[in-house]
Image (tube, rainbow, N blue to C red):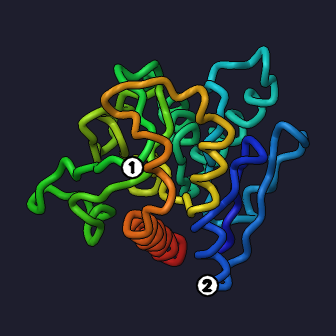
Amino acid sequence: MKIHVLQHSALNTLGTIEEYARTKSHPLESTRFYKITNPPSLDSFDLLIIMGGPMGIYDYEENPWLRDEKAFIKQTVEAGKPLLGICLGAQLLADLLGARVYENGHREMGWFPIKAVRTEENKPEFLKGLPEEITVFHWHFRTFDLPEGAVHLYESEGCRNQAFIYDNRVLALQFHPEVHKERVKSMIGRFGSEMGSGPFIQKKEEMPGQEEYLAGTKEFMFMVLDKFEKITHS
């Protein structure tokens, strides 16, 4: 499975995604639209992953390259390719599929649980085998509505729409399953002074060193990417 990643800042390290690709010997390449103007060819990858970033999806004045990236993502969706969007990437997918993206009622920052919203009886195929509840890393203050035709997968106490899948191949995750310990520390170092306070903002001193959560997050990410591998080889 050839994986291509869209990155939005130097902080967007690939974490468990890179580890997965290395473990499975999958080719992994990346594009940064804020540095180059030429997108990858659609036949050069099997799975497109859209990472997070500090900007908003409509911040065209500060980030004019966003228009080019959105056009490329839309082209990838229309070509029938599998896609995975994480945080900002999830919001970009929601927007391109016709849903609204806006400020959430609460900021979510730190380790908080998400729960599956579907029971075993009406669970979509993609969700089968994934945990019913898992504590994952969050760093966002925006959210999205569900696009028409999308299947709601996960929710949290602080944010209703944590994940959806569209057409059984376009997956949006508002949280960060790619983080490893270095990524958590770098996010705190860069944005920790801007966190503020709230019921779903964990103390930054409590965020690092959560080995159990990090291990669960890695397992979750590997399971999701395994599912995409089956899709690309079906």
**Which residue is rendered at x = 81% and y = 30% of the image?**
65
Query: Is residue 174 in view?
Result: no
* Circle 1 residues within 10 Å: few <14, some 14–19, many ≥20: many
Q: Which residue is mark 1?
A: 111
**Which residue is rendered at x = 71% and y = 34% of the image?**
71
Whether 57 is drawn above or below 216: the answer is above
Q: Is 43 left or right of 126, judged from the image as shown?
A: right
Residue 216 x, y percent position in the rendering: 38, 68
Kind of residue at badge 1: Trp
Picture quarter with the N terminus: bottom right
Whether 195 is drawn above or below 134: the answer is above
Q: Which residue is mark 2?
A: 23
Toward the top, the furthest residue is 61
Toward the front, the furthest residue is 205
Residue 84 x, y percent position in the rendering: 53, 53
Instruction: Say what secondary structure mark 2 lies in.
Output: helix
Query: Is residue 20 in view?
Result: yes
Q: CA distance from mark 1 to mark 2?
A: 26 Å
Toward the left, the furthest residue is 121
Q: Nearer the viewer, residue 203 or 66?
A: 203
Q: Is 154 left or right of 67, judged from the image as shown?
A: left
Q: Is 228 left or right of 7, judged from the image as shown?
A: left
Instruction: Say what secondary structure mark 1 lies in.
Output: strand
**Which residue is rendered at x = 58% and y = 75% of the image?**
20
Q: Dividing the picture into quarters, in which one does residue 104 lie? A: top left
* Circle 2 residues within 10 Å: few <14, some 14–19, many ≥20: few
Q: Nearer the viewer, residue 45 or 214?
A: 214
Residue 208 x, y percent position in the rendering: 51, 56
Earlier in the chain: of badge 1 and badge 2, it is 2
Kind of residue at badge 2: Thr
